[in-house]
Structures are given as C-alpha cells and as structure tokens.
Amino acid sequence: MSPRTGTILISAALFALTLGCAGIVFFPYYWMIVSSLEAASLFEWPPRLVPSNVTMDAYVKIFTERDVFTWFKNTAFVASATSIFCTLVAINGGYALSRFRTGGTTAFSIFILFSQLLPATLIVVPLYVIFRQTGLYNSLIGLAIADAAFVLPLATWLMKGFFDRIPVEVEEQAMVDGCTRVGAFYRIVLPLALPGLVVVVAMSFITGWDEFFLARTLISSQSNWVFSVGLTSFETQYAIAWDEMMAAAVVFALPAVFFFLFVQRYLVSGLTSGAVKG
C-alpha cells in the first residue's frame, strides 16, 4: 500500500469517526424534533426515525393552552440582565486584576477561579435566605443576579487573560497623548479586548437562558417562570405530554441556537486566544 493510499484511508477513517461523533451529539435534537411532530413514534419498537404522520398540533397547543410567551419574555429578560451584570463586573474586575498587581493579586485571582468549582447546591440555601431578606426572592432581577454570580468568576478570569495580552505601553501612550486612565481603558484597551467581551456576553447569556436549578429555587409564582421551569409543567401526576414538551423544547432551543451561530466565530477565536495566557 502506497503512502498516499494510507493517508487517504486514515483521513477517511477520521472523517467517519467525526461523522459518527457528530451523529451521536445531534441525534437527541433530531429525536426531539421528530417527537414534537409525531408523539406516537416515542412508543413504537423498533423506533420510527422518519415520521409518517406529521402534525403541528403540539405546537398549536403550547401557544394556545400554555403561557409560552410569558416564559419566553421572562427568559429573555433574565438572560439579557445576566449578560449585562456579568459583563460590566467582569471587564472591570478583569482589568483591575491585570493592571493593578499587588502582593495578593495572584492569590485572589486563583481564589476567584477556585470559586467556580463550587456547585450551586452548596450555596443555594444561604442565597435563598439572603434573597428572602432583601426582597429579591421571586424576582427576575434577583434571578439574573444569582445567575451572573455563578458565571462571573470564569468571566473575570477570561477578561483578565485578554487584558494581559494587551501591552501596557498602549495605555501609557494614550495617557501621554492626553487620555486619562479611564479614557484609555474605554477608548483603547476595551476595543482591543472585543473578542473576550463577546465571549463573556455569549457565555453569560446562554447561562441565563438555560439555567434551571436557581430558577426553580428562587422563583415561586408562575407569572415569573422562565422557559426551563415552564417545561416541567408538561409533567403531571398521571401523564406526561411528550409531544407538547418536545415542541416547547424546540421553541426554547431555537433562539439560543441562532444566537450561538451568530457569535460562534468570536467564541472560538476568543476562547483560544484569551484563556491560554495570564
């Protein structure tokens, strides 16, 4: 066998392996769509991969019998607020850790990253008590603050990595030309760190969009339900409306998919360039 033939076979094998892994990843999403179009396919054996009796009844029901628009509005608000809170704090915190180095800066940076390892179940009880005492319980703003708090350590670390890659001389030159430190930060440094900013915005938005545990714990009234909590309402004591649940899941996933497709090139470049240094 010639070297060229061997290279072609290896490439073909790697392509087949990649295709198989992609199929494993995307099959649950495909099955979710199929189940929303034909609930009967869920209970047949062998399973029918291609629906034969496609109907949109499940989608009609979730928009007419469920409060989907309220869930969508609440989820969009929480995700947007989470993104705003997290981004504002992360860019300032990351810049401070990158530029104002003291004896405890490194230790504090490590502590911030270490806090990301703590599970939400560890602090949800004290968080619940604090929110009850401060009036943030059953509040969408409170939920956004809680979501931002959990994604903030990693976001701050990422922004620190991006600011570390920007030479200090750039700021010094701007200040020599008449800028203040704040002006140099917003006019020079922050535009150069735009890929990292996009990463933080996307990461915090997606976290706020699909978070369930905190939303279930810190929200009590149905009028403030987000979509992830609303999906549980399709499960009753005696039955589960699988087709409606899958239809709602498709509607829930589409905005996040489109948002990710829009920012994916910035995410790839940002994560590979900002998280490897500092």
Image: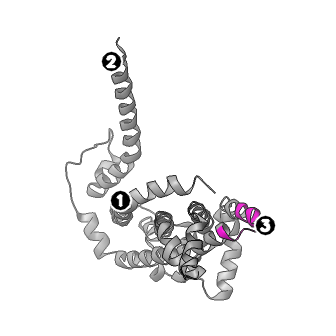
> What residue would you read off at disc 2?
5
What label does residue 261 carry, if any? Answer: 1
Which mark is first along the chain, 1 or 2? 2
Across and down, in percent, residue 1 comes to 35, 11
Direction from residue 217 to residue 113 in the image, left or right: right
What label does residue 22 carry, if any? Answer: none
* Relative height, residue 21 to residue 179 (above, below): above
Residue 217 appears in the picture as rendered: no
| Label 1 neighbour load within 10 Å: few <14, some 14-19, many 20+ | few
Q: How many numbered markers are drawn?
A: 3
- Dividing the picture into quadrants, the one containing residue 166 is bottom right
Across and down, in percent, residue 274 comes to 54, 57
What residue is shown at x 34% (from left), y 49% (from top)?
31
> What residue would you read off at disc 3?
104
| Mark 1: amino acid | Leu
Which mark is first along the chain, 3 or 1? 3
- In space, the residues marked 2 and 1 are separated at their CA atoms by 36 Å
Give the structural element (helix, strand or loop) at label 1.
helix
**Labels 2, 1: front one:** 2
| Mark 2: amino acid | Thr
**Labels 3, 2: front one:** 3
- Start-end of magenta stretch: 99-110
| Mark 3: amino acid | Gly
